[in-house]
Amino acid sequence: MEFKAAHIKVIFWDFDGVLMDSNAVRDLGFERVLADFPPEQVAQLLAFHRANGGLSRYVKFRYFFEEVRNESIDDAEIMEWASRFSVIMKSLLVNPALLIPETMAFVKENYANYTMHITSGSDQDELRYLCQSMGIDQCFTSIHGSPKPKKQWIAELIEMHGYDTQQCLLIGDAHNDYEAAQYNGIAFMSYNNPTLDRFSNVKLF
């Protein structure tokens, strides 16, 4: 399928690493919330986290306990760990200095020219809190995150608004973002990750 930049009308933005330089802060959050566990186990979680940037913290905590520690964990416990993580994130990420100048300049200059949504693997309530606290929420038609997966959010938004998939673009920095674009039959633009550049089929900036 061929996509053209001139035809794009709808942009789905990833958040971490694309709109905000927050990946190192996310690393720190996992280190702090799991500080009582063996460092080598936390290191395994961080490796999984970095390799799967588009996945939610719910998936990552489940991976830590079930795959790294070989322990069973229920959904309520996962939610508790995610809540502790979110408290740390809210305290560290409400920092406009972490916003990425290039992408935020594009957003602020073009939000009237495109329909823009944030679709992220990060927690939805946390994302909305961060964007509102930094005064950028008004640039986006909607802001969505986990626990619902990104590819599902995009599918629902396309159906809800009747978007033409030929006019939709996902901008992301993780392989999961590319997979979400493929799943929904929309264009993909790699940002801030040269290893994904070969998958980009539209470049806006």
Image (cartoon, rainbow, N blue to C red):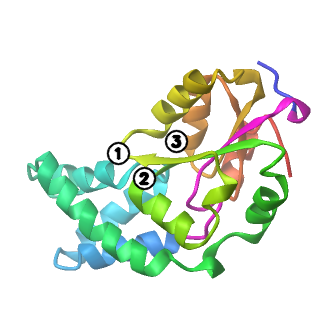
- Front tag of 1 and 3: 1
The reply to whether the C-beta atoms of the residues labelled 2 and 3 are less than 8 Å apart is no
Closest to the observer, 78 or 129? 129
* Residue beneath the point at 26% across and 56% down: 61
Q: Are marks 1 and 3 in contact (CB under 8 Å)?
A: no
Measured along the vertical axis of the image, is residue 168 above or below residue 1?
below
The image quarter in which residue 68 lies: bottom left
Residue at numbered disc 2: 124
Which span is picked out in magenta? 5-22
Whole-percent x, y for residue 88 in the image: 35, 76
Residue 112 point in image, percent of width and height: 81, 48
Q: CA distance from mark 2 to mark 1?
A: 7 Å
Residue 193 seen: no
Q: Where is mark 3, residue-wise?
A: 176
Local SS, label 3: helix
Indicate the quadrant containing the N terminus: top left, top right, bottom left or bottom right.
top right
**Which one is earlier in the sequence, the residue at label 2 or at label 3?**
2
Return the x and y of residue 147 as percentages of the image width and height: 35, 45
State whether residue 35 is above or below residue 44: below
What is the C-alpha distance between the residues marked 1 and 3?
Answer: 15 Å
- Can you identify the residue that label 1 sits on? 147
Residue at 32% in and 61% down = 45
Tell me if I can see residue 38 in this picture.
yes
Q: Residues within 10 Å of mark 1 (few under 14, many from 20)?
A: some
| Kind of residue at disc 1 | Pro
Q: Does residue 196 sit above or below 159 in this rendering?
A: below
Judged from the image, the secondary structure of the residue bearing numbered disc 1 is loop
Kind of residue indicated by mark 2: Gln
**Amino acid type assigned to the residue bearing label 3 in the image:** Asn
Identify the mark nearer the N-term, 1 or 3: 1
Query: Contact (CB < 8 A) between labels 2 and 1?
Result: yes
Circle nearer the N terminus (2, 1): 2
